[in-house]
Image: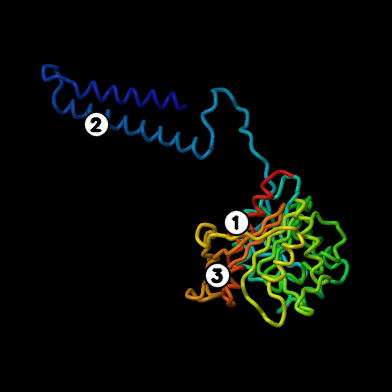
Amino acid sequence: MRAAVLGLVACACGLGTVSRSISPEMKIDRESAASLLALADRARDEASNATHAIDELLFHRGTDERPAGDDTPAPETPKADIRRDGHVSVPGGILVFPSTFHPAEDGTYDLLIHFHGNTSVVRESAEVAGLNAAVAIINLGIGSAPYEEYYTVGGTYEELLEAVDQGLRQRGLKNATRGRVALSAWSAGYGAISSIMVSRRGVDDLDAVLILDGIHGSLEDGKLNPLQMRPFSRVAEKAAKGEMYFGITHSEIDPIAYAGTKITADYLINAAGAERHTLDPELDAPKYLSLESMKGAVSKRLEKSMVPVSEARIGTMHVTGYRGETKEHHMAHLFQMGATLLPELVARWSVGR
């Protein structure tokens, strides 16, 4: 087809050249010459339009012209797809399907379960980070107690996992098969992860834990209660060996009455055998994300960027401390999760199992 079009173009251009080169001595009057020139121009324009149409067709097909007589259908990569609008209700929250979520053709999918936080912010953060996972967002109330108590009951966590599987089947993923699971929490949501690490039955492939300015603890004679910290210190020990990912961000807020997130982070760094190193506030700062979902959640003048102070790394455990002692700094850990911990999870899950 392209050859035919190019031939037509050549003919039109040739006709135009010959017509315009007619000499005064030739027996053709001006009116005839003008008609001939107009015919040549029209032929050339039609040929050009035809060529453009072919190029457009080939571009949208995403393939080059195929050999004449080859009627074999162009290969297509099969994809499992689902309805992404709205959400599906699950115990304690909702299940959403970010635009970046693409389950495997056999129905296998990865899952992020996030505890505590604005649902729109969490979903948009997953999309901005490019996370290929379904996302369950659980909100149970104010303070860590509701989260701790809810998941202390054996089987509660597994019921959530099954509800997620069912939700994906409802949305069109017929053979929904759970792959890797990541648990994340902001602020009080850490209480859920604390209980889950004790009560879970191991039916899930728990691959990562992300804590965004969470993990508080009670102090006894100025020291953290080791039993209270044990669920997280076990995660830290596994991450130090590279068995799972453990990401923590913390502020400098000191609640005074109990241990803040910096104190608990120090405890876990020590449990993992790591050390803190100073970071450059500008060179090491994550890119600031101005999310659409942030609008209205906090006034523009109170938005805070993440200014890094220190970090500790060992195995696949990463702790980053950020400046800030206000509630707005605390909220920034949620708003900026798409620039801090989620990219690390994306990098981990981008590598084949």
Q: Give the CA distance from mark 3 to mark 2.
A: 61 Å
Residue that mark 2 sits on: 38
Horizontal side of residue 74 vs 229, given as left or right = left
For the image, the number of numbered tags is: 3
Q: Which quadrant would the C terminus be assigned to in this image?
A: top right
Closer to the observer: label 3 or label 2? 3
Q: Whole-percent x and y of residue 310?
A: 60, 62
Image height check: is 20 above or below 175? above
Q: Quadrant of residue 26?
A: top left
Horizontal side of residue 28 vs 2, given as left or right = left
Counting residues from the start of the chain, the first of labels 3 and 2 encountered is 2
How would you rate the neighbour count of disc 3 (Cα within 10 Å): few for under 14, some for 14-19, many for 20 or more?
A: some
Closer to the observer: label 2 or label 1? 1
Q: Could one spot residue 241 in this view of the protein?
A: yes
Residue plotted at (29% across, 32% down): 42
**Label 3: which secondary element:** helix
